[in-house]
Amino acid sequence: MDEAGSPAPAGTGGGDDPGGSTRETSRRLSREQIFVLVSAATMNLGCMMTYSILGPFFPKEAEKKGASNTMIGMIFGCYALFELLASLVFGKYLVHIGAKFMFIAGMFVSGGVTILFGVLDQLPEGPIFIAMCFLVRIVDAIGFGAAITASSSILAKTFPNNVATVMGSLEVFSGLGLVAGPPLGGLLYQSFGYEVPFIFLGCIVLLMIPLNLYILPSYESDPGKQSFWKLVTLPKMGLLAFVIISLSSCFGFLDPTLSLFVMEKFSLSTGYVGLVFLGLSLSYTISSPLFGLLSDKMPNLRKWFLVFGNLITAGCYMLLGPVPLLHIKSQLWLLVLVLVVNGISAGMSIIPTFPEMLSCAYANGFEDSISTLGLVSGLFGAMWSVGAFMGPILGGFLCEKIGFEWAAAIQGLWTLLSGVAMALFYLWEDSTARRRSKAQNSLGTEEERAALLPNDT
């Protein structure tokens, strides 16, 4: 196992760290850094494709098997619940398990159970089908939680000075997975039936494992002394967690609801429904690297990206139906335009959150090590999973009770609240910093005067 070397303070690099300042300041990436990027890119692409193929056709198939809208939402939502639990556990024990082993094992489990999902249509309708859907999704979530926690930690360790840039760039592959998954899944479903989309994509993920097994570097580190409880009780960390939950719940809301709404409202086929999802995924894919680069080059912009990204997202969900209070007629072009803007606003607010969490942890005494990165990665993944769990369940329930238009507007209130909360916190933080600076300047002036008094006398 390759030695990772001793860590250095965030933003400075140094020591034997593979992402140290010597490599970061150089415009050329090292061989190890390239391998890490390739491994993370293949994981993001494969896992996001397998995750997103359900949207265009699974709700319809589940309805045929006797599942209600609420139950379909729970099938989508249970994935996030168990990813939440997996992220917390794997983030805590990342050092003990090993980042590379966790990464590879997670991809293996995710690919295997995706293939199993493809044979569930052979089961009888009713409780047996629903129970097996839950079981397979739960195991898939555990595998994905392991892979994404390990991936985020390895990336932050390898690129300590450019976390947002690297993660924003890799969101291109997440976005490509989200872009390619729905239309590819819809096309394969229409052409070959229920089984083929899952078997095809599951095999793609499994075929990526030998490559990652060969090129992904290994890291060793001693377990950290900081507690997970100390991390989650930091006030700023709590607000950032609320931002992550609100944004991920918006994405999760669309999974069980948007395809049914589009098919009923505009009479589109399954293949065209996949293209509607393309508007959100493609705009997020294109905008994420830009916001990642800006977040690293101009860190002071991160907070305002978070704030305005959340507020714009709230407006998008008001217009998604649109909400009846606006008296705007629902049209397909408007829906696609709103999804495109939502993808941009999502990139604006999601990408800066991880570096903001890291800087918050380091500012509060957490050491720069793979152990801390595991804690932060686990927390990020866990909070994302909370929202992804709440979004589909509440979305399915609200759509069943009050319709898609009102349900989307209520969903948008989450991001409105988180955006306003972050804005108030940052204003308070800036005000406190200014008062502290004035107090220090005043104290320095008084000390200078006291030092000069004997000479004046």
Image (spheres, helix red, strand yellow):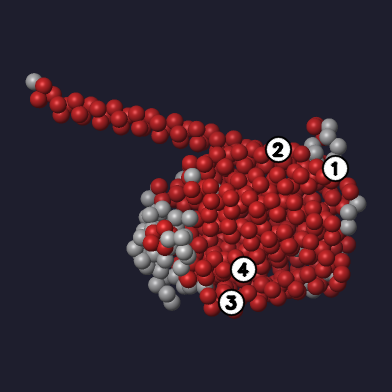
CB atoms at circles 4 and 1 under 8 Å apart? no
CB atoms at circles 3 and 4 under 8 Å apart? yes
Amino acid on which disc 4 is placed? Thr
Q: CA distance from mark 2 to mark 4?
A: 34 Å
Q: CA distance from mark 4 to mark 1?
A: 36 Å
Which residue position holds label 1? 331
Observer-nearest of 404 and 184: 184
Foreground: disc 2 or disc 3: 3
Amino acid on which disc 2 is placed? Gly
Of callouts 2 and 1, the N-terminal one: 2
Which residue position holds label 4? 42
Which residue position holds label 2? 315
Observer-nearest of 307 and 166: 166
Which residue position holds label 3? 211
- Residue 438 sits above or below residue 216 on the image: above
**The disc label shown at residue 84, or none:** none
Q: Quadrant of residue 80?
A: bottom right
Q: Quadrant of residue 169?
A: bottom right
Of callouts 4 and 1, the N-terminal one: 4
Density class for disc 4 (Cα within 10 Å; few <14, some 14-19, many ≥20) is: many
Residue 375 position in % (x across, y down): 48, 58
**Which SS class for mark 1?**
loop
**Which SS class for mark 4?**
helix
- Residue 355 sits above or below residue 177 on the image: above
Residue displayed at 80% across by 32% down: 326
